[in-house]
Every structure is written in C-alpha cells, then in structure tokens.
Image (spheres, rainbow, N blue to C red):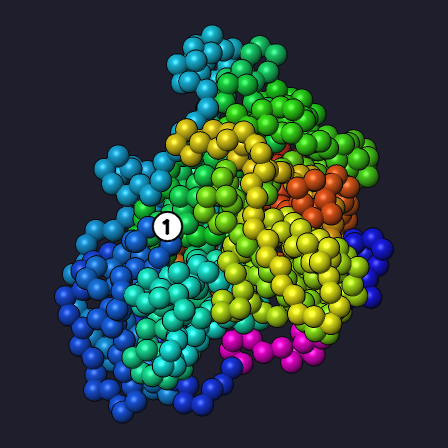
Amino acid sequence: MQAKDISSSVKKKDHDGKVSGQLAYIGDVKLESMVYGVLYRSPIAYGKVRSIQLPPLPEGVVKIGAEHIPGGNFVKLLRPDQPIFADEWVNYIGEPIFMLVGPKLEILHQLLDEVEVDLEEHQAVYTLDEAIGQKDQAGVFAYHEFGENLEVIQSIEASAHQIIEEEYETGYQEHVYLEPQGMLGIYSDDEIRVEGSMQCLYYVKNALISALACEGDEVRVVQSPTGGGFGGKEDFPSMMACHVAIAAKVVKKPVMLLFDRAEDFEVTTKRHPAKFKYRTALDEQGNILCMNVELFLDGGANAGLSPVVLQRSLLNSAGVYQIPHFHAKGYALKTNTVPNGAFRGFGAPQSFAAIESVLGHISQKLQRDPIEYKRSYLVKQGDPTITGGRFKDPVLIDDLIQDLMETANYSKKKEANQSFNKQSKRYKKGIGASFFLHGCGFTGSGERDHIKATVKLAKTEQDQVLIKISNSDMGQGALTTLSKIVAHKLALPYEDILFPYPDTKEVPDSGPTVASRTTMIVGKLLERAASKLKAQWQSGIEQEVVEHYVHEEMIPWDEAKFSGDAYPAYSWGVNLIELEVDTLTGLVQVEKIYGSFDIGKAIDNLIVKGQIDGGMAQGIAYGFMEKMTSKAGKIQQKSISDYGPPTAMDIVHIQSKLYDNPYAGGPYGAKGVGELPLTGGAPAVQAAIEDALQIPFYQIPITPELIIESLTKKGGGGD
C-alpha cells in the first residue's frame, strides 16, 4: 500500500533479499564452464614494454592481450587515452598489460608470479606539485578560465588595503564500497553479455561496442545487485567489462573478473587530490573587494572524467557566496599515478573545503566570528551565479543557518568551550560549521545535448507496471523512490510497480546514475510517463508509454566561455560539528553532529535520512580520518584498516533536519540529495578543530600527526 504523503517511508524493494542475505551479487554467480581472469599489471609508473615472456601455460589457460581486441584499444569515455591492455607504453603502476584466463584462480596467480616482462623505465611524474611545475610543457587534460577580467582584478588589488593569499590542499579519498569491483562476460553466438556491479549501463555498452567493433544489438549489459558505488563504479567498470568481454569472445566461455580489496585499493579510481591558490583583496573594514582563484586537480595517468570533475570544482570555487569581482581558472593535470575519477560530490568537496577554509581564516584575521562573517556574503534568490546564471528559486540557506545555530545553542556553546579550554591543558573543545550547495544534474546543457534521457513504463495484462530505465540502484534506494513516484501518480499500490535490475536489451538509455540526477531528472520523466499512462489506462491490456527529456528554459550555457546557467536547481546544506581534541595524542573525538538540508521534497524520509547519515560520515572522515598516500607512484594502503574509514565508534548520532522547498522541475518537488550530504563534512570538521586549537590548517585530512606537528610549531601541547 502507499501513504498519502509521498515522503512517508515504505519497505524498500530490495529489503527482503538484503536482510536475508539471499540477494545474489556478482561474486555469488557460478556458471557451468565459467573461468576466471587475473591481470598482469605494470610494476613501474612509466616506461616501454620491450618483451613479455610467459611460463608454459597449462591446458585451459589462455593469455588475453591487446592483440585480441577487434576494435580500438582504448576505453571509450571522453578521450581515447586509456588502453584496455597496455600494448607498448605503461603509464602507472597497476596498469593492465594482459590477462590470464583459466579455471583455477590459485594456478593463475602462480603463473603470474612466473611471468617475465622486460620494461624500459622512463622518468615519471609522481606528484601534483611536479605536474604543476611542468604544466606549460605537457600533461594538461583540461583547462578552464572564467569570471571578472584580470585587468579589473589587478586594478582593484592595486588600491586594496590588504591582500591575503592562501594555498590549500586536499588528498585522495577511497570509495570503500562494500562490494569490490566485479564483472562477468558471457559468450553466445549472437551476443556478448556482460553482467556486473555498475552505475552506468550505457557507458559500459558504448565501451564494449567500441572495443569489440560490433553493432549495438550484439552487446547486452545487465546490472547485478550492486553493493555501493559512490562514483567508483561510474567509469571504472567499462574497462573491466572490456576485459571480460574480449576474453569471453576468445575462449568461448563465461569469464569472471573479481577484485579483492587490496587490488581494488591499488588500481581503481580515487577522488582527485587538489591544490588551490586563493588571492583575496580586502578594504580597511575587512570587506572582500575581489577574489582570484587558481586550482589544480591530479588526474592521474588518464583523462577519464577529470575534465568534467574540473568543471564542477571550478563552479563551486566561490562556495555559497556572492563574491564581488571573482575570477577563477583551473587545470586537470597528468601524473604517472592511478587514474582518478568520479567520487560522490564530483570535485565539489575539494572546492568547498578550500573556500570555507579561506573565508574562515580571513574572519580569524579580522577577529570576526566565522559564521557571522560568512553570512554577510551568502547568495540570495535572484543573485547571479559566478558563471552569469541565476539563482532563480528561493534560497533558504540563511534560514537553515539561523535555525541550526539556535538548535545547537551556538553562542553559549562557544562561550562554554572557551571557558573549558582555558582551564584544560590537554583537552580542547571546538565547534565549527560549513555552508554548501550542490548543482543538481549534468552541467549546462549536458542533459539536452549528450544524455537525451528516455524512460519507458510497460503495463501488464495483470495491471502491474514495469519501470524500464537504465539507472542503477547501488544502495541509495532508487528501486524504491522511483517506484513510489510511479505508484503515486497512477494511484496504484506500491507493490504493483515492478522495477527489475536494468538490462540494455530491455531498457532505453535514461542516462547514468550520477550527478544527483536520478530522482530529479529521471524521476520527473517517470512522473510524466505515469501521467500519460494514467490518461490512456485500459485495464487488462498490455500498454507502453515512452517519455523523453525536455530541457528547461534557462540562461543558455556556453561551454567555451563557461557562462550561463550551469544547473537547473540547487540543493543546499549546513553542517555543524562539536568535537574535542586531545593535544597529547592529536586524536579527535567528534561529540555532536548537526545537519540541515534543502533538497526540495523528500520522496522517502528514511531513504533520505540514510543518504544524509552515510554522506555526512564520508565527508567528516574525509576531513580528519581517511588518509591515502602514493609513494613513487604506488598507493600505500592495501586494506580498509590501513586506510581508516569511520566505524560506528567514530560517528555519533547525526541530528538532521529537512526543509520543505519544492522545486517545480522535480517529481513532487524533489531535488538532488545523493552528493550534497558529503560536501560539508570536511570543512565543518576543520573549522571545529581550528576553533579548539586556535591554529589554522591548510589541508585535509587533519590527521593526529598533523595536529601534533602544528602544536609543536605553536609551542603547545597537552601535559
């Protein structure tokens, strides 16, 4: 049954299978005659492959390499620069050179140890700083520049009272999805079928068509139940799909490729490390006159999705603030390290950590409360965006801030903390906040010009309705929320809406499951399709309706000039964190977590609460816990315990609140929610640690080691 209010929670579609443990993930699949694949990977960061010497291969073991690829030896995405199998040159440690396929994994791993590959090693670029130093020579994946004319900026700076410059850095972040990457290729005479853990079925299908040099109807892609993605299963599965599909075509058997956690950590995409350079001019009263930003992203060895991650990073470089005379430029640069890619927030968490840090440090220099100072620059409805678009819908962020400050008793808590910190030598308490937004959907005209989403609804003779879309449920609740939208519009029981895991043989391309677009964009298409079906409903008869994306009228987006409306709508958030720092050990103990969010209308309250809790935990951990490093091109962390994501002991109860601010362009007023909750965690943690220690930090994560080092420089520390 369905409740009258669509926000009321229902039992999730996949609840029983997950709770009982009966839901079969790709690693659970066992097929007759199935064989396994293991990849031989480059042991060096940059060099030329001179020769490959294999040991004698037992019967049933086959080597699969670039020579077996019928089409182009690249993973089709934005640029043809990522080999499926490295043929001549290797560009990072862990790059696949070939695959051994056979019936027993232990034998395949033994054979890999006996392989001899002669490699001519060349000088590699290991760090973002090295890449920045060489950016004028080569290795630039993308570059954008926009905003106020630099001559105007320079003129304003010349008469400014003060110029404040700040460099800020963010590190890697690992997805830590519950289920590591996995893909299965199945051969038959008329098609290659690929099943696996993935977010974007048609990305995978298009990559297979390119690699196999075949027609669309010769390739079939099916999503398996997927144990988490967070962006890590957006582009990476396309490479694995090519591996298993090519192998399956050669050996004429099903081929399974599964990563263990160590391999997944070493070779899959990460959040881009970033460096920001902010230059801010102030007048005598501390008012901002202009701001000039330069940002750099470490793209790793291949372009991947770095050009569009750079776009979103730049679009968020001014945060939620109306900064006068703002100018920004950014680069996505090549290094000989593991390629970086999509991660929940898609470049925004780096930028919000930076801008929140910059404004927080300016307020400290001015001896102003950071929240008070930042509130004086908040954007309002009707204000221009930094790309000359418009915030056309109500902007409630100041209301969110005021309400949250009252809920947390901010002013009294600040006073109490100051009193405590004066008396306690070892432990210091702090409170900090962050303000942020997230543009919903693809940037600019991407939905209209590139995605062109299509959805179908198919009614059965039994008057049940099947949802036919290519969007994936990876734990975020899409099976449930989209079914609710259709059920409510048709006034049918929720149980009569069927949503099988998508299969490209059955579903149209409704776009990828990314960019906080699934509920807002695809959900709106399904709402319109359901309205059509309702108008022509004939009981007991099979019917089908199709709905296509229609672009909302906005200020036109100019990709070259980086101008116009970047997004049709924005979701908004405020985080506030209370914590305690042990100055003897550098350990941080989070004590209270608050979050307020405007996501339009919640389609299911419990699912949204789950997104908020999970997203805030990831964002908070990004700020002070999760430390991933690369040394001479090799990722150093090999396990979850090495990396240090949060446990239930690290994240206390999250007190969150939703603000009802319906968006007309979303189903029942819904906007995007998936990425927003992660974005504010790190800057709120940083603000709270700085408040506790009265020390500025210029990077995340703020680890215990960094805290102790900073306290030592300051001359402080616990007894």
Q: Is residue 649 magenta?
A: no
Residue numbers of the magenta segment:
12-28
Q: Left of 573 or right of it: where is 206?
A: left
Q: Is residue 27 magenta?
A: yes
- Quadrant of the snapshot with the C terminus: top right
Which amino acid, mark 1? Leu
| Rendered image quadrant of residue 535 | bottom right
Residue 414 visible from this viewpoint: no
- Mark 1 is surrounded, within 10 Å at the Cα level, by few (under 14), some (14 to 19) or many (20 or more) other residues, namely few
52 up-or-down from 291: above or below: below
149 up-or-down from 240: above or below: above
**Residue at x-position 70% and y-position 40%:** 664
**Label 1 sits on residue:** 78
Q: Secondary structure at mark 1?
A: loop
Query: Percent from the top left, x then y, of residue 5?
Result: 83, 53
**Residue at x-position 37% and y-position 61%:** 207
In the foreground, 46 or 626: 46
| Rendered image quadrant of residue 422 | top right
